[in-house]
């Protein structure tokens, strides 16, 4: 039987300094500005990535609930509500990744790091895909309204909010999710480099990232079109107001001359 590996995304930024203060009962074996890697024992690890991902190798359900419970601020979320990915680690002579199974020769802290980083990226991508899909679905509603009626029910304030959400999502991905990020050790070990490559390929990390960027590009184009239509609508309204005011002045002048 293999080692179960679970990855969750908490849908928020994780302050690593706070994590270090809260979790002191386990050995912190690696740390950088963007992650913390803990070892519980020889074959049990957990990994915290600052952009919101937490990954566990061979950890009990109680321990997973305990650690994630420490990281969730409100406590209202449950594990079932979070983006989730699961793989099984098995030990064989050949390094391979396929159909929810990761084959390795042995589990060292460097191998654990490579596995957990890739799963952290994958589950974060799942979160961003969901956010992007939600934005796309909402813009699709207005596109269908435009197709059927020639207009859409969207105010300038709502438009600005949509544009703001899209920009913030793009900024979050650019600043927090380094999809091509690999541990330094992967550059100096053929086995780790092979594992890293096969994980990225199996998880479709690069393709999914490109898909998100393409979807955000489509959303941006739609919003720009909607904004142009709204601007034209309000410009036309302003022109009619000016015309009406001019006509009112003309009528007033005529009436003054007649009477």
Image: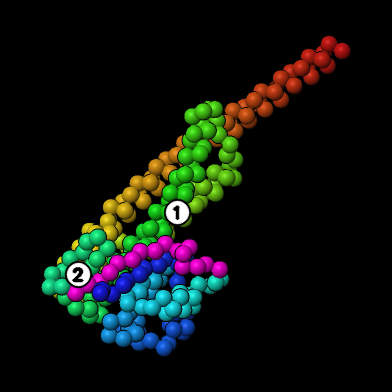
The residue that disc 2 covers is 103
Figure quadrant of residue 85 = bottom left
Residue at x-position 46% and y-position 75%: 65
How many discs appear?
A: 2
Please identify the residue farthest to the top as the structure is shown. 258
Quadrant assignment, res 152: top right
Q: CA distance from mark 2 to mark 1?
A: 32 Å
Mark 2 vs 1: CB contact within 8 A = no
Judge depth for marks 2 and 1 and give the one in front.
Answer: 2
Tell me where residue 168 appears, x and y as whole percent. 46, 55
Residues in magenta?
A: 76-91
Q: Is residue 95 magenta?
A: no
In this picture, is 123 found above or below 153? below
Q: Residues within 10 Å of mark 2 (few under 14, many from 20)?
A: some
Does any portion of residue 107 appear in the rendered image? yes
- When the figure is inspected, residue 30 is found, relative to residue 197, above or below; the finding is below
Whole-percent x and y of residue 191?
15, 72
Element carrying mark 1: helix
Q: Give the image location of residue 147, x and y in percent.
A: 49, 29
Q: Earlier in the sequence, mark 2 or mark 1?
A: 2
């Amino acid at each position: 039987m293999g080692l179960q590996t679970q990855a969750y995304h908490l849908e928020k930024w994780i302050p690593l300094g706070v994590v270090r203060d809260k979790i002191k009962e386990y050995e912190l074996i690696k740390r950088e500005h963007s992650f913390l890697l803990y070892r519980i024992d020889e074959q049990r690890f957990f990994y915290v990535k600052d952009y919101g991902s937490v990954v566990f190798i061979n950890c009990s359900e109680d321990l997973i609930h305990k650690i994630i419970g420490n990281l969730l601020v409100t406590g209202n979320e449950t594990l079932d509500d979070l983006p989730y990915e699961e793989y099984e680690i098995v030990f064989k002579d050949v390094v391979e990744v396929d159909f929810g199974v990761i084959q390795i020769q042995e589990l060292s802290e460097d191998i654990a790091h490579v596995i957990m980083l890739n799963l952290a990226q994958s589950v974060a991508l799942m979160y961003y895909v969901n956010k992007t899909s939600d934005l796309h679905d909402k813009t699709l509603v207005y596109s269908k309204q435009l197709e059927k009626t020639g207009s859409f029910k969207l105010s300038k304030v709502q438009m600005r909010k949509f544009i703001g959400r899209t920009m913030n999502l793009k900024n979050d991905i650019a600043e927090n999710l380094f999809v091509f990020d690999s541990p330094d050790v992967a550059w100096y070990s053929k086995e780790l480099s092979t594992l890293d490559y096969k994980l990225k390929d199996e998880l479709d990390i690069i393709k999914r990232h490109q898909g998100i960027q393409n979807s955000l590009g489509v959303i941006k184009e739609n919003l720009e079109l909607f904004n142009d239509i709204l601007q034209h609508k309000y410009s036309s309204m302003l022109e009619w107001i000016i015309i009406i005011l001019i006509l009112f002045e003309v009528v007033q002048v005529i009436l003054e001359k007649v009477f």
